[in-house]
Amino acid sequence: MHEEARAARTSDPSRTASASASAVPAGPTAPAALVELAARLLNGRTVHKGRSLLGLTGPPGAGKTTLARYLVTEINRTEGPGTAAYLPLDGFHLANAQLDRLGLRSRKGSPESFDSLGYLALLRRVTVERFNDVYAPGFDRSLDEPVAGRHVVQPHTRLVVTEGNYLGNDDSPWSSARALLHELWYIEAEDSLRDQRLMQRHVAGGRTPQAARDWITGNDDPNGVYVKQGRTACTRVVRAGGLPQDDSGGSVL
């Protein structure tokens, strides 16, 4: 499946390999156009045997979760229920008890605060397991904890949309996860917009405005700097504006 994914990435002439961020074209912003791009993995010249994996990455507050959920909803609406499934990296946050044990509670959302090898193992599983339901964890923002089995990839699922901060980065195991993806989109948003979204998110989660600002400065911003280093590894850059907001669990990232 590793080789199949690599072949799918290189066989489509519309995909751009770039040595510099400025050479990666920004994709369309219209929601319908983004759905059409995702649907090409099912119904077009990029179609291939097996299950397709579409990755979304970008810095905290860029809108990865909103776009991923939107794409899955729209693909299932047009192609049939269960055609697309959602598999977020968020579900692989270490539980708070483990973060406390490791001294990482103040760095929640950083690369080391995830069960990254568990995420990679589940990605590998969904590429090959076609006869059983495959369950994926999610993240409950009200609990501030991951929740087992929140999402499901069914046997007839043909497209899995996965999203997370670090899929474009070269450090292990992110590069191994990226090798399984047939496309990886970088979700771009102005830093000022991301900052506004993050402030709203953290305050809504119970932090005071000052605590939210401290968290953004000390955690979200450094993570975002690292995420941006992976932009050139992505196959497409999109600005996902005008999407309906989804508050049903969301991302802490």
Image: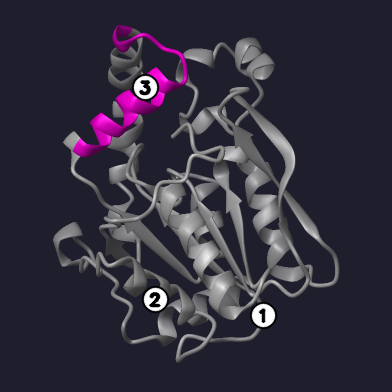
Q: Is residue 208 visible?
A: yes
Q: Which residue is mark 3?
A: 219
Q: Position of residue 44 (x, y in %)?
A: 47, 90
Q: Position of residue 33 (x, y in %)?
A: 33, 74
Instruction: Judge whether 99 appears above or below 123 on screen.
Output: above
The answer to whether marks 3 and 1 mark residues whose Cβ atoms lie closer than 8 Å is no
What is the distance, in whole Å, between disc 3 and disc 2 at their CAs?
33 Å
Q: Type of residue at label 1? A: Gly
Instruction: Judge whether 199 appears above or below 166 on screen.
Output: above
* Image quarter of residue 1: bottom right
Q: State the residue in front, 198 or 17.
A: 198
Q: Type of residue at label 2? A: Leu
Q: Position of residue 19 (x, y in %)?
A: 22, 64
Q: Which residue is mark 1?
A: 50
Q: Across the whole image, how many numbered discs are drawn on residues?
A: 3
Q: Which residue is mark 2?
A: 37
Mark nearer the N terminus (1 vs 2): 2
Q: Helix, strand or loop at disc 1?
A: loop
1 or 2: mark nearer the eye = 2
| Magenta stretch holds residue 209 | yes
Instruction: Judge whether 76 appears above or below 47 on screen.
Output: above
What residue appears at the point 36 percent right and 8 percent down from the top-left corner?
A: 208
Mark nearer the N terminus (3 vs 1): 1
Most common SS among magenta residues: helix
Q: Type of residue at label 3? A: Asn
* Image quarter of residue 143: top right
Mark nearer the N terminus (3 vs 2): 2
In the image, 90: left or right of 205? right
